[in-house]
Structure formats: structure tokens, C-alpha cells
Image: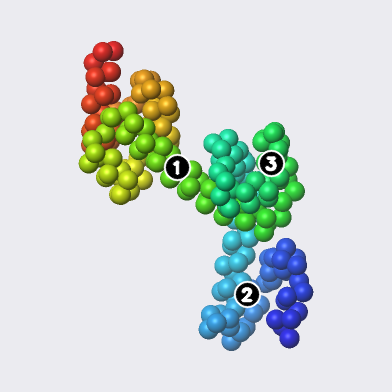
């Protein structure tokens, strides 16, 4: 009977009801899958509070806008995110309107999709860099194979650093010195030695 009643409650109203429960008033003997029901309710309420705070956080809007500006792919997660955000040519306005009008469940779904899209964009950047290094004959066959079969970029370079390297490759490997600080160059020297040799030549030439 409880299951039938719950099935008729819209998700967002169910979240509202869960957030309004006083978990301290629930007797310890009430359990959900052997867990105290009060403990489960507490965890749900913590998650709802986090989502409520995120809804008003500027970094969330910035994150959505950045993902869209990088270019959504043709995968299922990207299509769903685009539909959910109701994207138009004015990305900033689309995201702003979504944040203002979305429910907590919609925000949660958008964040989950954004995480999936972010990971796919990162993997695409790694592949673009591998292809660029290979096409420019800057990597040896062994190094290209290493980048292809091991998470060398993911383990050793941040997303921002990979993005810089991809941009660097698109510019015909022309050096913009201000983007390559000493720690970044040290990582390139260790993990992408063939690319570093090319950078070293450019640095020596000024």
C-alpha cells in the first residue's frame, strides 16, 4: 500500500516531503533494508541541502557554460543535457534561465549529465593530442602507442594542461611561453619527451 501511495507522488513533491521530515522523531526500530530509517532520511536531506546551495552558486552556471562552449558531442548524454538546458544561441541566457527555473531533481540530472560530458570531452582532448603528435611526427611510435593504451595524460596532466597542449598542437606547435610554466614543462619533459625536445628547440631559439 505504501508503494502504491509513493508511486502517485511526483518526484519533486516527494523530495519536498523528505526534506520536511524531522528524522529525530523517527523511532530507531523503523528500518529501510536493515538501516535505520532516520539515518537514510538524514543522508537524503544532506544531499538536498547541497543541491539547494549549488543552485545559487555561480560556479555551477560557469561550469555549464564552459562545457557548452567547448562543444557538446553527438552522444546521448550531450543531447540530453542540451535538451534539459534548453540551449539556444545565447548560451549564458539559456543556462541562467535553467538555473532560475529548474527543480532540484532537474539540477541533479543536469549535474550527472555534465559530469559524463566533461569526461568525454577530456577523453576527446587526449585523442586529439595523440593524433596531433602522431601527425606532426613529434612522438615516436612507442610513445604514441603508450598514449593510446595507457592513461598517461589522465594520470599526469590536468584537464587545463591537456587543453593547452591541444591548443598548442592546433597552432602548428608554435610556442606561447606564458602558458608553459616550469612545473608544466617538467611534466612534459618526463611524460612526453619527444614533444619536450621540440619545445626545447623553440625555447633555445627564443
Is 97 positioned to the left or the right of 141 in the image?
right
Q: How many numbered circles are shown?
A: 3
The part of the image, by quadrant, that contains residue 91 is top right
Is 25 drawn above or below residue 76 in the view shown? below
Is 150 positioned to the left or the right of 52 in the image?
left
Residue at 39%, 26% in the rendered image? 168
Q: Report which residue position mark 1 lands on.
A: 124
SS category of the residue bearing label 1: helix
Is 76 positioned to the left or the right of 92 in the image?
left
Query: Which callout, 1 or 3, points at the residue further toward the start of the chain?
Result: 3
Is 50 positioned to the left or the right of 203 in the image?
right
How crowded is the residue under tag 2: few (<14 C-alpha within 10 Å), some, or many (20+)? few
SS category of the residue bearing label 3: loop
Query: Which callout, 2 or 1, points at the residue further toward the start of the chain?
Result: 2
Closer to us: mark 1 or mark 3?
1
Residue 114 has which mark?
Answer: none
Q: Which residue is more in the foreground, 27 or 165?
A: 165
Residue at 65%, 46% in the rendered image? 82
Residue at 47%, 48% in the rendered image? 119
Q: How far apart are marks 1 and 3 (CA)?
A: 22 Å
Question: Residue 184, image x and y in percent?
Answer: 32, 32
Question: Residue 192, image x and y in percent?
Answer: 26, 35
Q: Report which residue position mark 2 lands on.
A: 24
Question: Residue 122, image x and y in percent?
Answer: 45, 43
How crowded is the residue under tag 3: few (<14 C-alpha within 10 Å), some, or many (20+)? some
Q: Report which residue position mark 3 lands on.
A: 87
Q: Which residue is more in the foreground, 109 or 136?
A: 136
Query: Which callout, 3 or 2, points at the residue further toward the start of the chain?
Result: 2
Amino acid at each position: 500500500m505504501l508503494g502504491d501511495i509513493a508511486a502517485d507522488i511526483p518526484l519533486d513533491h516527494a523530495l519536498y516531503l523528505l526534506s520536511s521530515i524531522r528524522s529525530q522523531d523517527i523511532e530507531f526500530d523503523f528500518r529501510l533494508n536493515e538501516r535505520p530509517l532516520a539515518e537514510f532520511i538524514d543522508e537524503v536531506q544532506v544531499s538536498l541541502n547541497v543541491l539547494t546551495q549549488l543552485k545559487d552558486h555561480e560556479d555551477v552556471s560557469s561550469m555549464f557554460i564552459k562545457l557548452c562552449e567547448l562543444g557538446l558531442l553527438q552522444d546521448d548524454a550531450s543531447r540530453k543535457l542540451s535538451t534539459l538546458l534548453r540551449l539556444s544561441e545565447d548560451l549564458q541566457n539559456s543556462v541562467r534561465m535553467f538555473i532560475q527555473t529548474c527543480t532540484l531533481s532537474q539540477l541533479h540530472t543536469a549535474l550527472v549529465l555534465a559530469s559524463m560530458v566533461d569526461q568525454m570531452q577530456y577523453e576527446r582532448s587526449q585523442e586529439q593530442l595523440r593524433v596531433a603528435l602522431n601527425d606532426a611526427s613529434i612522438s615516436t611510435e612507442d610513445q604514441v602507442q603508450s598514449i593510446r593504451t595507457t592513461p598517461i595524460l589522465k594520470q599526469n596532466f590536468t584537464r587545463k594542461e591537456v587543453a593547452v597542449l591541444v591548443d598548442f598542437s592546433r597552432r602548428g606547435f608554435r610556442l606561447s611561453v606564458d602558458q608553459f610554466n616550469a612545473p608544466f614543462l617538467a611534466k612534459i619533459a618526463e611524460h612526453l619527451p619527444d614533444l619536450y625536445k621540440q619545445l626545447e628547440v623553440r625555447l633555445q631559439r627564443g
